[in-house]
Image (cartoon, rainbow, N blue to C red):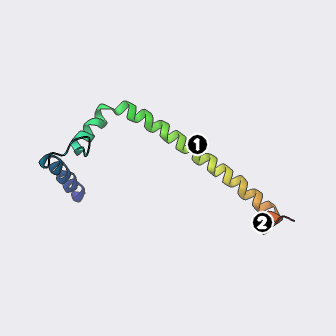
Amino acid sequence: MALHAIMFIVWEAAVRLFNIPVFFLPPPTAIANAFVEYWTPIYRHSLYTLSTTMLGFAMAVGFGLVLGLVVGWSRSIYAGSIR
């Protein structure tokens, strides 16, 4: 935990000390401010991403289950050759 805090402090100090442009490497405070300012769209898009990920996962599980059952029930497919 302390290592994380030190990392963020060094990051913030390096960006300010070397005058690195915000569009190239934003400091942690700018990132935190953006999260606060754009909370609503970030939340909305996160829910959309989560729902599409869960839908894709459910489809993969369903297809894998059906494919596994077909392979398990068919002796020729299970053996690896079709007679």
Mark 1 or mark 2: name the one nearer the start of the chain.
1
Q: Position of residue 39 (x, y in %)?
A: 34, 33
Q: Residue at x 67, y 54 (%)?
A: 64
Q: Quadrant of residue 82?
A: bottom right
Q: Is residue 55 left or right of residue 5?
A: right
Q: Position of residue 13 (x, y in %)?
A: 15, 50
Circle 2 is placed at which residue position?
78
Q: Position of residue 11 (x, y in %)?
A: 20, 51
Does 36 appear above or below 77? above
Q: Residue at x 44, y 35 (%)?
A: 45
Mark 2: which amino acid? Answer: Tyr
Does 1 appear above or below 35? below
Q: Is residue 65 left or right of residue 19?
A: right
Mark 1: which amino acid? Answer: Leu
Q: Which mark is residue 63?
A: none
Circle 1 is placed at which residue position?
55
Within 10 Å of disc 2 (Cα), the crowding (few <14, some 14-19, many 20+) is few
Residue placed most toward the observer, 26 or 1: 26
Q: Residue furthest left?
A: 17
Q: Give how far apart the Cα atoms at labels 1 and 2 are.
A: 29 Å
**Secondary structure under the numbered disc 1 in the rendered image:** helix
Q: Residue at x 23, y 39 (%)?
A: 30
Within 10 Å of disc 1 (Cα), the crowding (few <14, some 14-19, many 20+) is few
Q: Is residue 29 left or right of residue 60?
A: left
Image quarter where the C terminus lies is: bottom right
Q: Residue furthest right?
A: 83
Residue placed most toward the observer, 15 or 37: 15
Q: Residue furthest bottom?
A: 79
